Amino acid sequence: MAVRGTILHMVNHSLIKLLLFMIAGVVYMNLHQLELNQIRGFGRNKRLLMVLFLIGALGISGVPLLNGYISKTLIHESIVEASELYLHTGWADLFRITEILFITAGGLTFAYMTKLFVCLFVEKNADPKRQQEFDQKKQVMNLQSTLALAVSAVPLVLIGVMPNQVADGIADLAQSFLHGAALEEAVSYFSAVNLKGAVTSLVIGAIVYLFVIRTMLMKKQKNQPAVYVDRWWKWLDLETLLYRPLLEHLLPFLGALVCRVAGSLTDWLVALLQHTLLAKRKIKPVNQEDYVPGRLVPEIHTSQVLSAIESSLSFGLLLFGLGVCIAMLYMLSALL
């Protein structure tokens, strides 16, 4: 069950993040801003964008009838079963702690997704002029973007509504790769026990949103709406300390270094092969008798041409490419 839940959770997060990041792209391409106080109220009266965001937000929060709930249920149940399996050992307490952390983490996800939804689609911007601009901007996506978002949202609903038909089929395809075994009986995803775990997580998220986000992470202003504030210490900002230096400096440097080294090694290897194993064979000079009347070039024997081709580096690379293609076709046929 843990194996199947892990597989489905990776698939589900890929689908959910695809939808949510494209929605973030829609916001950014329209406003060129991502700071909450700047984009606040942008999605008001934009029902299609709101519904699509809601599908992704509820999916990643583990709300029933959406895909995230299915994989979270499997992972949660596997933790519960493990705690029962090791009931009389020291591992049982560890699995109980793991269960509490798992449910709490799901609640925190629901809390921050609620924060984003309310900020974008419910609240008004603190600047009335800016909110008026948002309200007047009705067309925020072209047809291609709308179709891309709508198509990306469909699997989230299908997996959540028909888990035994869709989700279990996906898990069946991939479970052997992680040495998983088929379940003895179908999972009752919408049983009272499984729904209880999801509801507990959502209640925790609602409490965190109401009593932490709305109080500690917002600052009231005199005669003005409250604004979102960042309470995190600037000197512990991971974006400044880690992510930007890593993506903008370290990774480009390492990539360039690897490319230079690989390029030098390739040049050295090609030169070595050309002077050793793939050295050009000497072709005998063409005799006068090899000239055929009516031709502008002498007739070269086929054996000489084939010998020159077989000794070339291009021929070796061609055979290597064919071998890779054959291996890929073999693996595909084995999967099918």
Image (spheres, grey):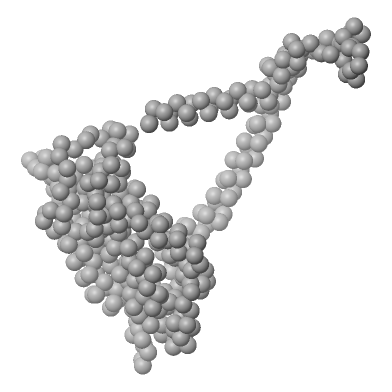
Which quadrant, please, contains the N terminus?
top left
Vertical placement of residue 88 versus 332, above or below? below
Vertical placement of residue 318 versus 120, above or below? above
Vertical placement of residue 53 versus 166, above or below? below
Q: Residue furthest front?
A: 294
Image coords of residue 250 (percent x, y): 55, 51
Q: Residue furthest left?
A: 88
For the point 36% across and 70% down, which residue is it? 50
Q: How many marks?
A: 0
Image coords of residue 134 (percent x, y): 46, 80
Which quadrant, please, contains the C terminus?
top left
The part of the image, by quadrant, that contains residue 263 is top right
Q: Is residue 62 left or right of residue 314?
A: left
Q: Is residue 216 left or right of residue 85?
A: right
Nearer the observer, 60 or 99: 60
The part of the image, by quadrant, that contains residue 260 is top right
Image coords of residue 109 (percent x, y): 29, 62
For the point 40% across and 56% down, which residue is it? 152
Q: Is residue 113 visible?
A: yes
Nearer the observer, 316 or 159: 159
The part of the image, by quadrant, that contains residue 181 is top left
Q: Is residue 109 visible?
A: no
Vertical placement of residue 61 versus 252, above or below? below
For the point 34% across and 78% down, which residue is it? 122
